Structures are given as structure tokens and as C-alpha cells.
Image (cartoon, rainbow, N blue to C red):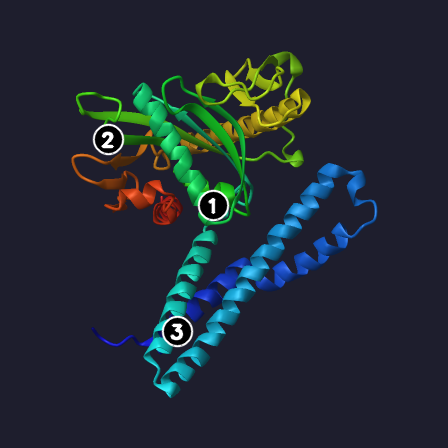
Amino acid sequence: MAAREYDLEIAAIDATLVSIEKVLDLPKLRASAIELEAAAGVANLWDDPENAQKVTSRLSRVQSTIGRLEGLRRRVEDMPILLELANAEGDESALADAGAELDSVKKAIGELEVQTLLNGEYDERDALVTIRSEAGGVEAADWAEMLMRMYLRYCERHNLKVDVLETSFAEEAGIKSTTFRVSSPYAYGTLSVEQGTHRLVRISPFDSQSRRHTSFAGVEIVPVVEQSDAIEIDEKEIRVDVYRSSGPGGQGVNTTDSAVRLTHIPTGIVVSCQNERSQIQNKATAMAVLQSKLLERRRQEEQAKINALKGDNSGSWGNQMRSYVLAPYQMVKDLRTDYETGNTGAVLNGEIDEFIEAGIRWRRSS
């Protein structure tokens, strides 16, 4: 095996980081942080909770981006020193550690480079993820739960805050649907490429004859609505149903009818929330989810008009976007980007970074 040319690798990642610093405009970020820190320090900030939340959230995101950039810059500048010490001592173990650090820095810079492609109107926001079982009966319900676990494991691996708002369990196994919020800078922009129909092919654990089955589950990703989005909903256009929260097998979680289901009559959009003890809290959370879905609907309608004027349908992904085959062979393949892997176990355990990166790059080039 040829010896690694560490100097060339360091020069390459340094150039990439310089490019990222220019795109993200580090001086402007630092100036914004100073302004936001001043705004967050105003004595009566929380007299206006919506504005306070907006200011503190923006400050947190700016500081997070600055910290990430500065941390990577320090690591890149430390690399020549680590390599020089390892070479001076002739320590193969130290050289291997330096090489591992270089690989780690390279990976982190690559992930940040992908983030620079997330410049859509809502890409910086938190994301609302909804997963629904589709065709396939009990197989599809089980598959929907497997997808839920996959995304929750992905969030856990990346230390992303997750709040499960509602889960509707199926009778025999799996789930009918679930909705959860992912709170992190660029959560929507990152996860939005996962939207679409996911197809599973496997030997069914529910088939006594061990036949191969195909099942489908749908993933919907929408940005979390903000006060400035001004999505107005007429209360007369909403049907409110309350019911008792339940867990797997119908086991009661609450002893009161605190869960809330909202139906937006004009669009048919239905949202539910059962994670709070209070019916009032559940209704408020469900209303926020409904606003987010209506915002995304409006965005899609506006984009459709633009595409119609341009005569451009290249951005349409269609319904089915990824296939997961567990039998007779092992493969996960994205049907848009053609990225694939045979390590199905890792993917279903949340290791979907390469699929997301390929999706983001594909969307940018479409």
C-alpha cells in the first residue's frame, strides 16, 4: 500500500474549509452573534415570548455554526503539529492516531460542506417527520415502525433533540403512523430529502409459509412553522376530536380524554398529539403541526406554479424513492441518486448519512 501523502491531504481539506468559511461568511456570522446576544440580553425580552423564542433560537444556531467552524479550523491547524511529532518520534502508533484524526476532520468538513448546499427558504428550521404505513397490511405497519426506529437512531447518533408528538399503533404489530419533531439547525433541509415512499422486500416474519413480501411506508417531512409565517386558520374550518391516549395493544396511557385530533376540513389534513397530559397543551401542539403542514402545502403549490411556468418537472421525485431489499439478496438503493449499499443492517440502524448527502447533492444539481 502506497504511503499517504498527509501534506497534500491537509492542504486539500484546508482549501475546502476556507471555501466553506467564505460561503457561510464567518465575519458576518460573528457580527450577527454580537447583535443577537445584545437582543437576547434585553430585560423585557420575554414580554413577547414569540419574538424571544425567535431571537434565542437564532442566536443558538449562529453560535453553533461559529463553534463548528472555529473547532474545525483549530483541528486543521493542529494536524501538521501532530504529524511532525509522530514522525520525529518514529512512533507508528502516534502516526496511525494522526491519520485517524485526519480522516475524522475530513469527514466533519465534508458534512459541513453539504450543509452549505442547504440554502432553501426553510432549510435552517426544525423538522416535523411523519411516517405512515401504506400498502402491505401488517407488513407495512411493521415496516413503518422499522423506519421510525431508523430515523430515531439517526437522530440519536447525531445528538439531535427529538420530541415524539403522536404514535398510532397497529393492532397486530407495528404502527399506523407517527409524528415527531427534530430540533437542530438545518434539520428540515437535511431530512427533507428523505421524503417519499420507502419500499421493503423481505421474507415476512408474519407469514407461516415464509414467503417474500413487499410493503410500503410513506415519509413526510415539513418545516416547523414560525410566528412570522402568518398561516391563519379559521377555527370554523377545523374539527376537533378528543380521545384517550393509548399505547401498544390498546393499553391506556392516560385515564382522561387528553389526546387531540384536528381535521382541517378544506384540505383534509389530519394531525394528532397525545404526548402531553393536558388536552389544552395537546391542542396547541397539534395546531402548530397543522400550521406547519399547511405552510408546506402552500410552498409546494407555489413551487408547482413556478415549475408549470418554467415547463420544468425535473424536480419531481415521484412517489417511490428508496428500496430496501432483505431477501433474496441484501441491498438498499436510492432510486433518485442511484447510491446503494449492501450493509442493510447498518442502514436500518440509522446509518443513512451517505444517502442523505447524496440526496442533498442530487437535489442541488437537479
- Helix, strand or loop at label 1? It is helix
Determine whether 180 is above or below 66 in the image: above
| Inter-mark Cα distance, 2 to 1 | 26 Å
Residue hosting label 2: 201
Residue hosting label 3: 98
**In the displayed structure, does residue 366 sit left or right of residue 120?**
left
- Helix, strand or loop at label 2? It is strand
**In the displayed structure, does residue 87 sit left or right of residue 59?**
left
Q: Is disc 2 in contact with disc 1, using a CB cutoff of under 8 Å?
A: no
Q: Considering only order in the chain, which callout, 1 or 2, is on the residue closer to the N terminus?
A: 1
Badge 3 amino acid: Ala
Residue 304 in view (yes/no): yes
Q: Using the image as rendered, state which of residue 261 and residue 245 is in the foreground.
A: 245
Residue 331, given in percent of the width and then of the height, sits at 23, 41
Q: Residue at x 44, y 75 (%)?
A: 79
Q: Using the image as rendered, state which of residue 56 and residue 136 is in the foreground.
A: 136
| Inter-mark Cα distance, 2 to 3 | 42 Å
Residue hosting label 1: 156
| Inter-mark Cα distance, 3 to 1 | 27 Å
Q: Residue at x 45, y 51 (%)?
A: 117
